[in-house]
Amino acid sequence: MSFDTQILKSGQGVSLGATIIRDGGLVGMPTETVYGLGANALNEEAVKSIFVAKGRPQDNPLIVHISSVDMLDELVYDDGLARRLFETFSPGPLTIVMKKKDIIPNVVSAGLDTVGIRIPAHKAARDLISQSGCPIAAPSANISGRPSPTTAQAVYEDMAGKIPLIIDGGECAIGIESTVLSIVDKPIILRPGAITPKMLEEYLGEVGVHRGEVSIATSPGMKYRHYAPKCDMYLSSSIEETKCLYDRYISIGKRPIVLALAENVDSYIGMQYLNLGDTMDKVMHNVFEYIRVAEKVADVIICDSVEETGIGASIMNRLKKAASKYEDK
Ligand code: AMP
Ligand code: MG
């Protein structure tokens, strides 16, 4: 099916969006992390169409978004821990993986007996859920494998013609996807995000962090390549390496661009660069958007590395994946 994709601001967008969700359709929706591609999580056909629109492999599970902790008991088995964590960290960028109840179709969880649940902080997302009257399953609203969209325009780039509506809720405040925490066994972070291990450890004691690839049985979503720009991308580990690569690309007639940390830009005078910002929060906010800007004007992106501590580790997780196509060659 082909759609004349509309972009509407939050107010109007939410009421039309709720009608579309109730009718089994798809809506591009803002959240504070990245934009989501939402459908009624309890409608199997609607959820299947998310996979089609994104070109997403069927064994990559979706996150179910709820508007309040009161929706939890209908969807998952919780001995009280998830509720307590949500009361502390939500609404916000924390997804909790728990044992699912049968009401959640297997297509949502990609056949796993667990499901990730999140309460988004963006008001338009919560309004959309409550006006729709159902939990909303939503992965990021990009074509599978592309950088996550953090503006309504970026959703349009990937989803025009494939969905009827994008709700424009402005730039995503955070800019990278939620922290995914499994509490099925010992607490373990499956995907790092703005909620760091340290923040969780205050409430949970020791929290494991998954590094690298996971077996398919644990988290199918983690085995796929992600976030890749249309052009090549290289993750540089020093100013010298960035400059050296830049010169080399220029010498072979390519158009490089640097995604630069603010503290490094004085070294990049005369080069084409985008300034990612002078704090980790700004870098996190800008990273996906600037990859999408850069791929339009360059043949190769050379990105500065950030220090792998706190949210820097979450940013580097995305950057390494975004650059991995290049490294694999
Ligand atoms: P995205 O589709 O980009 O929004 O990311 C959703 C991610 O959440 C997936 O790719 C998985 O890594 C993770 N996830 C969702 N549900 C589960 C689950 N039941 N078990 C493990 N990981 C999950
Ligand atoms: Mg995604």
Image: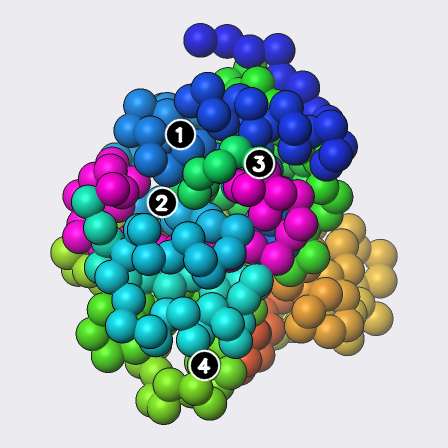
C-alpha gap between disc 1 and disc 4: 31 Å
Q: Amino acid at mark 1?
A: Ile
Q: Amino acid at mark 4?
A: Leu
- Mark 1 — residue? 50
C-alpha gap between disc 3 and disc 4: 31 Å
Near mark 4 (Cα within 10 A), the count class, few <14, some 14-19 or many ≥20, is some
Q: How was this image coloured?
A: rainbow
Q: Earlier in the sequence, mark 1 or mark 3?
A: 1
- Mark 3 — residue? 131
**Vertically, is 262 above or below 146?**
below
Residue stretch in magenta = 103-130
Residue 311 part of the magenta-drawn span: no
Front of the two marks 3 and 4: 3
- Mark 4 — residue? 200
**Could you tell me which quadrant the N terminus lies in?**
top left
In the rendered structure, the answer to whether residue 291 lies left or right of residue 58 reads right
Q: Circles 3 and 4: CB distance less than 8 Å?
A: no
Q: Earlier in the sequence, mark 3 or mark 4?
A: 3
Q: Earlier in the sequence, mark 1 or mark 4?
A: 1
**Vertically, is 29 above or below 315?**
above
Q: Amino acid at mark 2?
A: Leu
For label 4, the SS is helix
For label 1, the SS is helix
Q: Circles 1 and 2: CB distance less than 8 Å?
A: yes
Q: Is residue 261 visible?
A: yes
In the rendered structure, the answer to whether residue 316 lies left or right of residue 215 reads right
Q: Amino acid at mark 3?
A: Gln
- Mark 2 — residue? 62
Q: Earlier in the sequence, mark 1 or mark 2?
A: 1
Q: Earlier in the sequence, mark 2 or mark 4?
A: 2
In which quadrant of the rendered view does residue 9 lie?
top right
